Image (cartoon, rainbow, N blue to C red):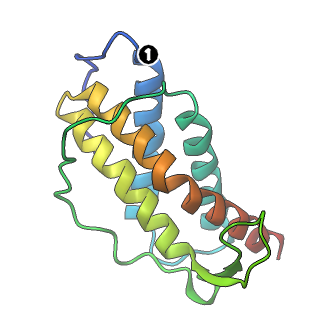
Amino acid sequence: MGNHASPKNISTNTSPTAVADFYEHACNFCSLIDTTSSVDQDIAANILSSMLDIYREILRLPQTEAADYDPPCNFFAPTKLSFGIQDCYWEIHDPTHLDEPVCGSLYDDCLEIYKILKNGCLLYESENTAEAADYWKLEFENHGKYHAADAIRALTFILDK
């Protein structure tokens, strides 16, 4: 992730600055997850801040169409990250409908976001900048935003304690 590739193949509807900015935020989040083992209040605050940056910056990427490519997915997921007893939280999947609460996992949320970000970073670093932007936007819209929203809420409560 230290190899910061220059954006050479940006499509005309993709802002090079927005993609480069998102790449930096994605690298920061992945680095934080890669280097963290035990999560204390300070680390939880850093993860929350980084996740909020990701959520804000993904909204700045342009809308995309489905692409016909497979992400590289040639990395190992972080295994040392531990939220300890604060890993599990209660949520309702669709808060617009009364439903039974289910148990969520901060580790799972961070891992799913990490995988989306890391795959996009690998595309970006292989000079597939437009594909990276498409991948980030589509994966976040289809899946990642729910993990981010759940983790943001759970981390906010953890930091209140």
Q: Residue at x 56, y 73 (%)?
A: 106
Q: Which residue is mark 1?
A: 15
Residue 144: % across, % down:
49, 55
Is residue 35 visible from the viewing direction of this image?
no
**The residue tagged with tag 1: helix, strand or loop?**
loop
Amino acid type, mark 1: Ser
Given residues 76 and 130, the one toward you in this image is 130
Q: In the picture shown, does residue 3 fall above or below 60?
A: below
Q: Please name the residue shown 30% across and 25% down the image.
A: 130
Residue placed furthest toward the right: 160
Image side of residue 159 versus residue 147, left or right? right
**Residue at figure coordinates x 76%, y 66% from the top left:** 95
Question: On screen, 95 above or below 12?
Answer: below
Q: Quadrant of the C terminus?
A: bottom right
Quadrant containing the N terminus is top left
Crowd tier of the residue under label 1, counting other residues whose Cα lies within 10 Å: few below 14, some 14–19, many 20 or above = some
Above-or-below relation of 139 to 84 = above
